[in-house]
């Protein structure tokens, strides 16, 4: 379990990126963090890896993350919003192998691990290619591979569907749904959250507004509109059809 206890983050004087956050995240399959721009979604993810300074306490499995941040970073992997910030080597193979090489794995073990994760994500044909020449969807899956190859228990993803066309977005949803690790991701894509999340955390101005099962939040039009969001498109269509049917009676 992940526990936030009175966690606050100040980026500018008088403005809280996170404002006294108290939150427990259990080991469910997939957690979506939603909210307007500036609500604190990305900051919440970064604080889990101590990548931003914060007041308060964050615990992973009842241990303060600051007591052994190296071990925490082995358990939790982060996929950045922009894949170009994560892919910097000459080939996809080198990018996926980078973390293992830094940890001192031998060449054979690295090779086996890279090809294993490439097979699982169906990107074997990309291994010799330069990441700069990939599509947005391909880059997203490769950046995920660089994290998965390290075998974390939890994967954090920041706006995973950004930069993607509809086909690449659907591929990513299929990949995310197939993973065994817990996924916690920040997103504006409420339809993606509706597809794959077990639970939603709604943030506004650095505060937790509500934490509940996915449908309880994403079907609540009044709640979402109060905090600058709209129903997922699929639910908007359903509501429109229902209203149309009712009006014809």
Image (tube, rainbow, N blue to C red):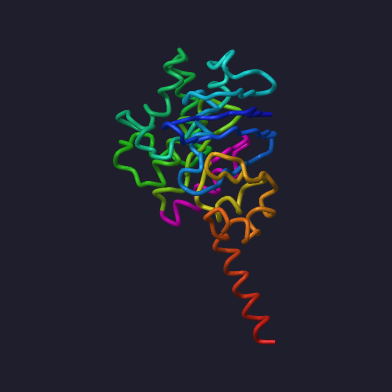
| Figure disc tally | 0
Name the residue nearer the viewer: 123 or 68.
Answer: 68
Name the residue nearer the viewer: 22 or 126.
Answer: 22
Determine the residue located farthest toward the front in the rendered image.
14
Q: Which residues are magenta?
A: 165-185
Name the residue nearer the viewer: 44 or 21.
Answer: 21
Q: Quadrant of residue 245?
A: bottom right
Q: Is residue 51 left or right of residue 249?
A: left
Residue 164 image position (x, y, % from top left): 41, 51
Residue 70 image position (x, y, % from top left): 53, 16
106 lies above or below 157: above
Q: Quadrant of residue 1?
A: top right
Q: Is residue 15 left or right of residue 4?
A: left
Residue 225 image position (x, y, % from top left): 57, 59
Determine the residue located farthest toward the bottom in the rendered image.
249
Residue 145 image position (x, y, % from top left): 47, 34
Tell me which secondary structure the magenta stretch mostly adopts: helix
Using the rendered image of the protein, determine whether residue 118 is visible from the camera's viewpoint: no
């Amino acid at each position: 379990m992940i526990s936030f206890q009175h966690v606050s983050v100040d980026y500018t004087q008088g403005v809280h990126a996170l404002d006294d956050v108290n939150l427990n995240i259990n080991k469910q399959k997939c957690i979506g963090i939603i909210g307007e721009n500036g609500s604190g979604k990305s900051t919440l993810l970064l604080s889990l890896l101590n990548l931003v300074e914060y007041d308060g306490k964050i615990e992973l499995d009842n241990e303060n993350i600051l007591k052994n941040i190296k071990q925490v970073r082995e358990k939790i992997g982060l996929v950045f919003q922009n894949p170009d910030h994560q892919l910097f080597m000459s080939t996809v193979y080198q990018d996926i192998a980078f973390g293992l090489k830094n940890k001192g794995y031998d060449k054979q073990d690295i090779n086996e691990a890279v090809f294993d994760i490439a097979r699982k994500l169906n990107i074997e044909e990309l291994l010799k290619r330069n990441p700069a020449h990939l599509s947005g969807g391909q880059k997203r899956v490769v950046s995920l591979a660089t994290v998965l190859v390290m075998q974390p228990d939890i994967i954090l993803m920041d706006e995973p569907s950004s930069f993607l066309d509809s086909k690449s977005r659907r591929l990513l949803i299929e990949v995310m749904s197939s993973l065994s690790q817990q996924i916690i991701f920040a997103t504006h894509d409420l339809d993606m959250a509706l597809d794959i999340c077990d639970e939603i955390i709604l943030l506004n101005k650095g505060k937790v507004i509500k934490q509940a099962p996915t449908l309880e939040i994403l079907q609540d039009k009044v709640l979402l509109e109060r905090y600058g969001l709209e129903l997922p498109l699929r639910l908007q269509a359903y509501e429109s059809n229902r209203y149309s049917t009712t009006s014809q009676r």
